Amino acid sequence: MPPPVIKASTSALETAGKARSPSAKSQAQQALEKLGLRRDIDLALHLPLRYEDETRVTALADARDGELVQIEAQVTRSEITFRPRRQLRVTVDDGSDTCVLRFINFYPSHQKTLSVGARVRVRGEIRGGSFAGGFGREMVHPGFRPAGGDLPSALTPVYPTVAGLPQAYLRKAVLSGLSRADLAETVPETGFSRKKLSKPLWSLREALQFLHHPTPDAALATLENRSHPAWQRLKAEELLAQQLSQLQARRVRAAMRAPALAGPAMRGTHCTLHEQLLERLPFRLTAAQQRVGIEIDADLKKNIPMHRLLQGDVGSGKTVVAALAAARCMDAGWQCALMAPTEILAEQHFRKLIGWLEPLGIQTAWLTGSQKAKERREALAMIESGAAGLVVGTHAVIQNKVLFKNLALAIIDEQHRFGVAQRLALRSKMTEGGQDPHLLMMTATPIPRTLAMSYYADLDVSTIDELPPGRTPIVTKVVNEARRDEVVERIRGQLNQGRQVYWVCPLIEESEAVDLTNATQTHEALTAALPGTPVGLLHSRMPVAEKRAVMSLFTSGQLGVLVSTTVIEVGVDVPNASLMVIEHAERFGLSQLHQLRGRVGRGAAAAACVLLYSTGDAPRLGETARARLKAMVETQDGFEIARRDLDIRGPGEFLGARQSGAPLLRFADLALDADWLAWARALAPEMLDQHADLAHRHIQRWLGGKAEFLKA
Ligand code: ADP
Ligand code: MG
């Protein structure tokens, strides 16, 4: 097995001299594509994360502990040692002092370049003193290469990259992209005059050239915190592109047409579906449900396609709001589709919806990837003929073979689980000439307001901000994994009261096999510890039919405990479940933990959530894991959770995780660059009206093909 990739290879000093095989080259090319670096301009706009100062060589005697330095020295000793573990230890001497280079992962090529007598240029963090356990001063996994050649005269940029794309290759590609790219100005001359600037802003060309090769006298701090004028220019450009494309998408949508779903198609009917459904519900809608219902109704009555996000915490009752919107749609004589990200969730919706709608004479079609050919053919026929007023399913709903008679409303549950392309596909299902369906997207992971304003300017948002009455708060406890036995005791307590328990095991992405063993072992251990209690097991690799069988045993109360991987994360609704145990809670993201916890506390009984954590070999949990678990204990409010998640992760990652494909801000920061955001927002409409050509070029330059995604 090859050793894992060495981190220090991001250093400019990696040994990149060797000729690469053609396959390595095409691998790098693929990696470029993966980063979205296709056009010259994409490469030119791929900016360094940071810089390394390789313009100087420091004498070892002058290097301070913890300092990142470049030295030039001769190898005086090279050996492989086995204590405490196998490692390559190379001693170098630069005449002023000596230092040990230590490699835990190494290739034969390392040994060759670092053989005794060789002169090398080494770059890394210097650590320890003569007191440090007898090792002396050392660098762990430094970058290195044979000495010789001139020192660079500019700072060396370090670019964001992915596996399989070495810095040296990326750097060359970026510089050649920069030299070819069209960098003509797209911001109209009057554009910057409205902003009071102490000095004229840099041109795009100057800014890019500088950021890719800053001179050594540049203040690294202003480059790193991105306050440098060159960065200011790029942030302004980026925010403008984002505001332009959002505004354009909004205008495009305002020009689209959708069926206006007003009033019943058949006059004289005694009572609309909508009214009947409301009457038959076993509960009263909360004030928040009523309010969002009115907002949705108002959109559906218009002949402009609705583009609305319905956000509401887990358990806030979004499904019934969706059902009422579907009823409105069918009242007007049109079809409605509901798509959910997993089969289990889609099936729950299907069950619930037929329970509500079938007695009212509505036929509902069910579509999923796993159904039998005959069943599917029947469903497709019902959809095409219009016999089915409502279609519920998974991704199967957007396949080509599915032809609607007259789709007018598409509802997407847990929208962030779907890619943008899938949302576009659902919208293109509309067959009536030139019209688009209304789109209602639902999510339990709310978007904080600042993000909603800038990323989703083209989206209307409805919020359910209260839970149905009678929910009891969930008590959350963080428990060290060493105290598992106490947790099992707690489970017994719940089972004795006739309650049910979820036990969730983490999904370890690198290895589905490990994931499986985890869940299986826990399942065995719990079965042994709880004699007489049926314990179910649910994981992502089970065949769908089996998953469904286990799930329905749990729903009907025949299983006391359900051990599962995160397949139950979304939407599952079993009110009798009162305790949720999450194993290795430290590995989960905050919003995922919140979603999982939302599976309990749905009934009237007191509910609890136990977050079991393990620190592995470390003495304590890492800082962000601690912050996540703390947030879970301190709040149960999904909006507060989202805010904290944003704090912990930053907007890029926060959104990246929730919406694949959306163009994110790479350079600007919504909070720090609020004045540039205001500037861009003011300039965008004027630019679209008066400089349409420049606006178009600006959007193309920054977003290229991604601009299309904004319409989804
Ligand atoms: P989510 O918003 O997480 O999708 P659901 O739609 O699954 O939530 O609703 C959670 C539970 O609350 C369901 O059992 C649902 O029937 C119930 N529910 C929804 N609205 C109300 C209400 N107004 N009063 C009481 N229970 C409700
Ligand atoms: Mg739901």
Image (tube, rainbow, N blue to C red):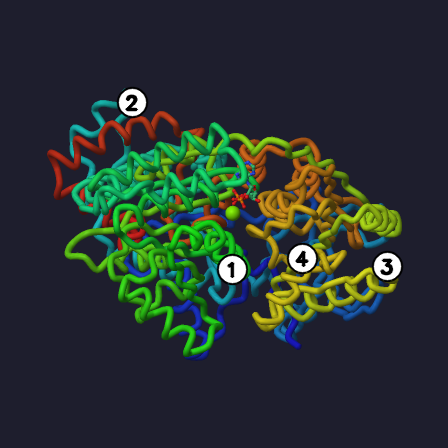
Front position in the image: 472 or 333: 333
Q: Is residue 624 visible?
A: yes
Give SS at disc 4.
loop
Q: Residues within 10 Å of mark 4 (few under 14, many from 20)?
A: few
Q: Closer to us: mark 3 or mark 2?
A: 3
Give SS at disc 3.
loop
Q: Which of pointers 4 and 3 lies earlier in the amino acid sequence?
A: 3
Q: Quadrant of residue 92?
A: bottom right
On residue 347, the disc is: 1
Q: Give the residue pinned by disc 3.
A: 530
Residue 226 at x, y = what percent? 43, 35
Give SS at disc 2.
loop
Q: Measuring 42% from the left and 40% from the top, which residue is drawn there?
A: 310
Between the residue at mark 1 and the residue at mark 3, the CA separation in whole angstroms equals 30 Å
CB contact under 8 Å: marks 2 and 1: no
Front position in the image: 378 or 215: 378
**Amino acid type for the residue under numbered disc 4:** Ser
Q: Which of pointers 4 and 1 lies earlier in the amino acid sequence?
A: 1
